[in-house]
Amino acid sequence: MSQRAWREEEEEEEDAPLVRILQVAVVCEWVGSEAFQPPVQGKPEKREDKRSAETDSQPTKPKQQQQQQQPKEKGEKEKEKQGEREREREKELHARELRQRRHKGEAESQLKEKKRQENADKKTAGASPSSKLVAFLTRHSRLLAVGACVLLVVYFRILSEGVNFANDYRDREDPFKTLGVSSSASDAEIKRVYRKLSLELHPDKNPEQSKQDAERFQHITHAYKILSDPEKKRRWLNNENPDYHGLPSDTETLTDKTAASLLDPSGSPWLLLAYADWSDECWELAETWERVGREASAFVRVGRFNWEKERNLAKKFSCYSVPMIYAYVKGVRSTFYGSPTPANISLFLTK
């Protein structure tokens, strides 16, 4: 053996303890690490690959990342909610502003219309009657057109069908003239004249009579029915409808036709009653009125007029309700107010 080889062996022998110490230290460090897992008794030892050990040795990184991401996600959700709240609030403010604008617009339009109407009223107030009439016609033109159309329809309907006024007692023939007797004729004289005319014009006596004779026979028959009935005769003499069973009275009945001649300012004074057949108060006053008529007939003329039918008389006496009592002396009208008793009415006449 050469000297050089001997020296190398000697050096290796000197370094052997150090190498062993280092090997033992490495082994102890590996045993104390987390990667070292001692084998379990009764079970075969499992060997894991280096890659699996490396992956298992780093389990904390995803958890840390998740823990860092969670507060970020919460912050983003809160921002989204806050954004939604702000958008809803903006929508509510916008809708409220629109409502306010609409109400404001309606109020302004109403105010403009009111001002326009006031200006129109001022113009019409200071305008002439002709301009007022023109303004009225233009304002109510549609209504007036409809009314004119209705009146035209009614007018042409009357022209086509005609109107029967035969039931109006004023347009009837006077029964006294029909029979040819005076209004002061007695019942016996009226009966005698009727028998004579009926024998001449009766259809049984004259089977070949003309149409004019048949109509005349009907007229004299109707006239005799009126004059033979005392109540109907009295109504006819009082200018009332003989076929109408209204409020009875022995006092004179005035009409628009007879009022001009009867109510003469230079003539005798009158005590008048305005009545209506449908009024219960007039029926209650009827007995009192007849008594007053009998007592006051020696001093004044007592009469009455129908408030509904005699519109000219009602207008002349300013009568708007019934019953009303008036005194007419020398063209001056006086109205009775108070309880309609015979004593109060007599006191009213003396005044």
Image: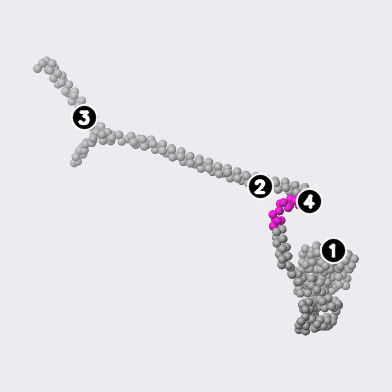
Spatial CA distance of label 4 from label 3 is: 131 Å
Q: Which residue is mark 1?
A: 333
- Residue 129 marker: 4
Residue sitting at 83 percent across and 81 percent down? 193
- Tell me the residue at 78%/50% (across/down): 130
Q: Earlier in the sequence, mark 2 or mark 1?
A: 2
- Quick check: marks 4 and 3 in contact, CB under 8 Å? no
Which residue type carries mark 3? Val
Disc on the earlier residue, 4 or 1: 4
As measured in the structure, the alpha-carbon distance from the residue carrying label 1 to the one carrying label 3 is 150 Å
Look at discs 4 and 2 and give the one toward the viewer. 4
Q: How is the image coloured?
A: one colour
Amino acid carrying label 4: it is Pro
Which residue matches tag 3? Answer: 27
Separation of marks 4 and 2 at Cα, in angstroms: 29 Å
**Secondary structure of residue under mark 2:** helix
Whole-angstrom CA distance, mark 2 to mark 1, is 52 Å
Report the Cα–Cα distance between label 3 and label 2. 102 Å
Query: Which dot marks residue 110?
Result: 2
Q: Nearer the viewer, residue 308 or 336?
A: 308
Q: What amino acid is at disc 1?
A: Arg
Residue 341 at x, y percent in the picture: 80, 70
**Disc 2 marks which amino acid?**
Gln
